[in-house]
Amino acid sequence: MERIDLRSDTVTLPTPAMRKVLADAEVGDDVYGEDPSVARLEAYTAELLGKESALYFPTGTMANQAALHALTRPGEVLLAAANCHVLRYEGGAAAAFAGLQIEGLGTSGHFTAADVAARLPPDDAHFAPVSTIAVENTHNDAGGRIFPQAELGKLAELAASHGLNLHLDGARIWNAAAATGISEADWAAPFDTVSCCLSKGLGAPAGSLVCSSKALRKPLHRARKQLGGAMRQVGILAAAGLYALENHRGRLADDHESARRLAAGLRELGCRTEDDPETNIVMFHPADAACFWKDAWKLGVLFGPPSGTRLRAVTHLGVTPEDVTEALERLRKLESQ
């Protein structure tokens, strides 16, 4: 029985055409700045996001952490959405490496400029200063929710008036753009730094970038070195990432439609879903999450392990509309057990 893997959009595999690009990639030593494939990827991504510069990283966590290193000083406070990736899923790196305290705001991936204003401390030595605001778009733990663009404008005004930096964890910025029709550059415009991922849904085997001003490129580059992210002939991976951006962004709307179909089918099976999916992530609650997860795996339908009563399903390049239909057919067998 063929597996239908809905654990994450990171399980995507390179397509045959991407594998050809991998094999034929032009490479050089990127530590010396001599890898032409990396240079092309960085230039293309910077242009796509409307920034002066882009720097290639091996992972999204490192990309986020390098950005925080570049924007903050130890002991400062980062304000971000509750349960955001930099707080919950990056191994405490912001505290360990940047010396940051992170305070969560809002619910379901959203917060407002008023939420930020209410958390700004007085100018007093007793209080740790807030220096940076981070937005995650789309928000993973909230089920791929899109941050309201209108609120970003208010955040940018507040940040400018208080001298605060703005970082966008845009690992799935491609999904936000595909779902709304708002370009990646428009989503990225208010931010000093923007991380974006190539291995979530786009099919590249690895890699993320941080887009920024030219002035921030040097501290980002130094942080990458300190975090162990200097790579040599990495153009093999960079070429795959460039192919992914040029060829796979346009089909992300298909994943969003598959997620909505999957959510509807899960509701028919008696599962409670957390809202209708805005992008490609379905958060749902079966009657017994642990049993449902275990039995689904036996049927070749793979979800991530339960978190309390909650399961997550993610549609992606490796899941066709036919796979969604087949997954729901298999899961219906659980009703008769």
Image (cartoon, helix red, strand yellow):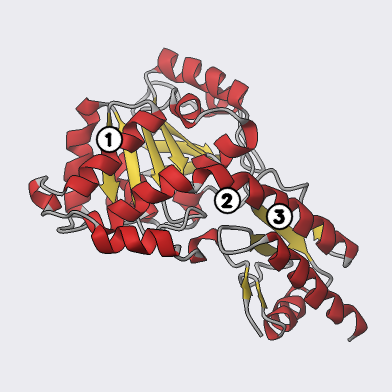
Q: Position of residue 163 (x, y in %)?
A: 37, 18
Which residue is labeled 2 in the image? 140
Asked if residue 118 is positioned above or below residue 225 in the image, the reply reads above
Three-letter amino acid code of the residue under disc 3: Ser
Asked if residue 116 is positioned above or below residue 69 in the image, the reply reads above
Question: Label 3's element?
Answer: helix
Q: Residue furthest right?
A: 336
Task: Mark 2 vs mark 1: give the one in front.
Answer: 1
Which residue is labeled 3 in the image? 258
Asked if labels 3 and 2 touch by Cβ distance under 8 angstroms, the answer is: no
Give the mark nearer the N terminus: 2 vs 1: 1
Q: Position of residue 230 (x, y in %)?
A: 17, 55
Question: Label 2's element?
Answer: loop
Asked if residue 165 is positioned above or below residue 229 in the image, the reply reads above
User: Residue at horizontal 63%, vertical 38%?
Assistant: 179
Q: Position of residue 262 (x, y in %)?
A: 76, 59
Give the mark nearer the N terminus: 3 vs 1: 1
Asked if residue 264 is positioned above or below residue 64 in the image, the reply reads below
Which residue is labeled 1 in the image? 43
Q: In the image, is 215 to the left or to the right of 296?
A: left
Question: Label 1's element?
Answer: helix
In front of the other: 118 or 156: 156
Q: Position of residue 83 (x, y in %)?
A: 56, 49
Density class for disc 2 (Cα within 10 Å; few <14, some 14-19, many ≥20) is many
Q: In the image, is 288 to the left or to the right of 15?
A: right
Q: In the image, is 243 to the left or to the right of 136?
A: left
* Distance Cα–Cα, label 3 vs label 1: 32 Å
